[in-house]
Image (cartoon, rainbow, N blue to C red):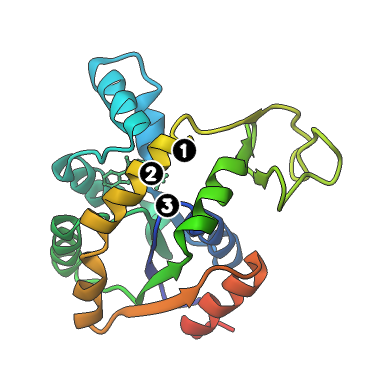
Amino acid sequence: MQKPIRIVLTGAPGCGKGTQARILRDKFNLCHLSTGEMLRAEAQKDTPLGRNLKAALDRGEFATDDMIIEMVSSRIEEQDCANGFILDGFPRTLPQAEALEKILQEKNIALNAVIEIQVPDEIIMERILGRYTCANCGEGYHDKNLKPKVYGVCDKCGGTEFVRRTDDNRQTVKNRLINYRKLTYPTIPYFEQLGLLYTVDGTGSIEGTSKKIIEILGLN
Ligand code: AMP
């Protein structure tokens, strides 16, 4: 059995963290922990928390550190994470990064790597505004760069309904990019100091980026 692999994928919104996380999950049987997906599930609920969260996400604002840290801390305890996990979208602030270190130390486990996927802002806007997913299986597509093989039919599950995220609009993306620079970027030097940081260029093909990540992890 392979040794557990525990990684963080970081980078600006739209850099390809989710796409790469799903590829690694399927290839190495890892648990994919996307805090964005967890929050979107919570935001769909017709509860005071759900409604507040939906409003915050639609403005491109972050959820509170305490809530996110609690969510991740209990999630990585679950059995499906025993073989390793990919953190996608967490940690997104310096307090979250420090909390992660503490949580892992308490559990006596360590990260293999933090991988930053770098993509310039102009490309990010174009990628996010064109992306959509299959409503049934979550497979990702893009208006220009990644269309289903048969128009209107998901390649993976045959589904015919597709959805776009409500926070994938120009104004919200601008706010998300501002928040990335202000709140998430400080985690990069933090992980660099811990000797965990690797950077990959995310402007090439999806397969090319996966290949680079797999090489970094020494899994090729
Ligand atoms: P994502 O799917 O990673 O793009 O996340 C979508 C949105 O969820 C972000 O724009 C944030 O508003 C929120 N979010 C996701 N992860 C976190 C986190 N670790 N801390 C705070 N807010 C988060």
Q: At 22% from the left edge and 75% from the top edge, which residue is drawn? A: 189
Residue 5 appears in the picture as rendered: no
Determine which residue is flagged by label 1: 170
What is the distance, in whole Å, between disc 2 and disc 1 at their CAs?
A: 6 Å
Q: Is residue 88 above or below residue 66?
A: below
Q: Are marks 2 and 1 in contact (CB under 8 Å)?
A: yes
Q: At 76% from the left edge and 28% from the top edge, which residue is drawn? A: 160
Q: Quarter of the image holding residue 7?
A: bottom left
In the image, what residue type sits under mark 1? Arg
Q: Is residue 129 above or below residue 107?
A: above
Determine which residue is flagged by label 3: 13
Q: Are marks 2 and 3 in contact (CB under 8 Å)?
A: no
Residue nearest the viewer, comparing 182 with 209: 182
Q: Earlier in the sequence, mark 1 or mark 3?
A: 3
What is the distance, in whole Å, between disc 2 and disc 3 at their CAs?
A: 10 Å
Badge 1 marks a residue whose secondary structure is: helix
In the image, what residue type sits under mark 3? Pro
Crowd band around label 2 with a 10 angstrom C-alpha radius: few (<14), some (14–19), many (20+): some
Determine which residue is flagged by label 2: 174
Q: Does the residue tagged 3 have its C-beta within 8 Å of any atom of ligand 1? A: yes
Residue 99 at x, y percent in the picture: 14, 59
In the image, what residue type sits under mark 2? Lys
Crowd band around label 3 with a 10 angstrom C-alpha radius: few (<14), some (14–19), many (20+): many
Q: Are marks 1 and 3 in contact (CB under 8 Å)?
A: no
Report how many numbered discs are placed on residues in the image: 3
What is the distance, in whole Å, between disc 1 and disc 3 at their CAs?
A: 12 Å
